[in-house]
């Protein structure tokens, strides 16, 4: 079965380490017959959530703020799988990605009971540090997020030990990213 995958790329470096993971993942996912839609969030105009709790009145344009989230909302609604792709910034997602995640709450507000649409999710991340201690905070956050939103994890992949552009070349996580994409049915 072909699935629709929405990749939210939170890295500002479009030829960086996160991008390399996304490219391998996408190659695998497309080889498996899936459809991949990708947004490079740093190149879009997306503001932080205002916390007004006033969204959801118009399901087609659920947020009170009108910016490039308008392009993301319809793709989010129709996606089966969300890919959170980000460099690790201070043991979390980049700000670009976090803003989008917060703004997706406007779609939840469109439901009278604030039910978040069910999704399967994947985490692709690049980080300078490596090892369990470095990964633990963001994995804890990711797990808490999925638990709260009732989303289902399909896999997490953190390529550690990569700082500068190109550091990821030959990294074993690239092959795993391809295989993770290919495994999606
Ligand atoms: C603001 C900032 C914060 C960072 N915080 C962390 C961190 O907490 N842990 C870590 O291992 N690497 C950290 N890094 C390193 C990046 O995760 C690493 O360089 C990564 O490969 C960048 O991915 P990119 O090529 O997609 O931009 C940080 C880098 C920046 C610029």
Image (tube, grey):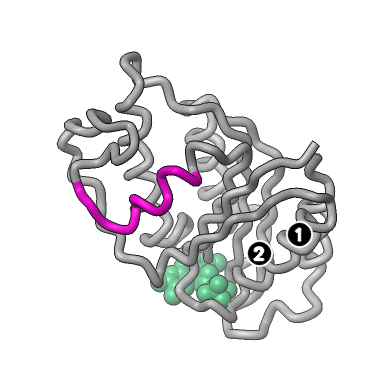
Residue, disc 2: 22
Q: Relative to residue 60, is residue 134 depicted above or below?
A: below
Q: Position of residue 83 (x, y in %)?
A: 59, 50
The structure residue drawn at horizontal position 63% and vertical position 47%, both measured from the top left corner, is 5
Query: Is residue 150 inside the magenta stretch?
Result: no
First of labels 1, 2 by sequence position: 2
Q: Say which of 158 and 36 sits in front.
A: 36
Q: Main secondary structure of the magenta part?
A: helix
Left-right relation of 74 to 36:
left
The structure residue drawn at horizontal position 32% and vertical position 26%, both measured from the top left corner, is 110
What is the span of residues highlighted in magenta in the rendered image? 65-75
The structure residue drawn at horizontal position 58% and vertical position 67%, both measured from the top left corner, is 127
Residue, disc 1: 177
**Residue at the extreme top of the image, as rendered:** 113
Q: Relative to residue 170, is residue 117 depicted above or below?
A: above
- Secondary structure under tag 2 reads helix
Q: Which quarter of the figure has residue 23? A: bottom right
- Secondary structure under tag 1 reads helix
- Whether residue 169 is visible, yes or no, is yes
Q: How far apart are labels 1 and 2 at the CA level?
A: 8 Å
């Amino acid at each position: 079965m072909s699935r629709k995958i929405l990749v939210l790329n939170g890295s500002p470096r479009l030829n960086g380490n996160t991008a390399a993971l996304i490219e391998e993942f996408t190659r695998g996912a497309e080889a498996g017959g899936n459809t991949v839609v990708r947004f490079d969030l740093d190149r879009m105009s997306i503001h932080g959530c205002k916390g007004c709790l006033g969204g959801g009145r118009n399901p087609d344009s659920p947020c009170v703020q009108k910016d490039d989230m308008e392009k993301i909302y319809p793709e989010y609604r129709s996606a089966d799988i969300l890919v959170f792709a980000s460099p690790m910034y201070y043991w979390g997602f980049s700000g670009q990605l976090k803003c989008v995640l917060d703004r997706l709450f406007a779609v939840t507000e469109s439901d009278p009971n604030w039910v978040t649409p069910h999704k399967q999710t994947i985490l692709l991340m690049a980080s300078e540090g490596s090892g369990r201690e470095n990964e633990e905070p963001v994995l804890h956050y990711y797990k808490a997020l999925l638990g709260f939103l009732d989303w289902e994890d399909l896999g997490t992949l953190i390529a550690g030990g990569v700082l500068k552009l190109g550091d990821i070349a030959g990294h074993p996580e690239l092959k795993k990213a391809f295989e993770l994409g290919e495994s999606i049915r």
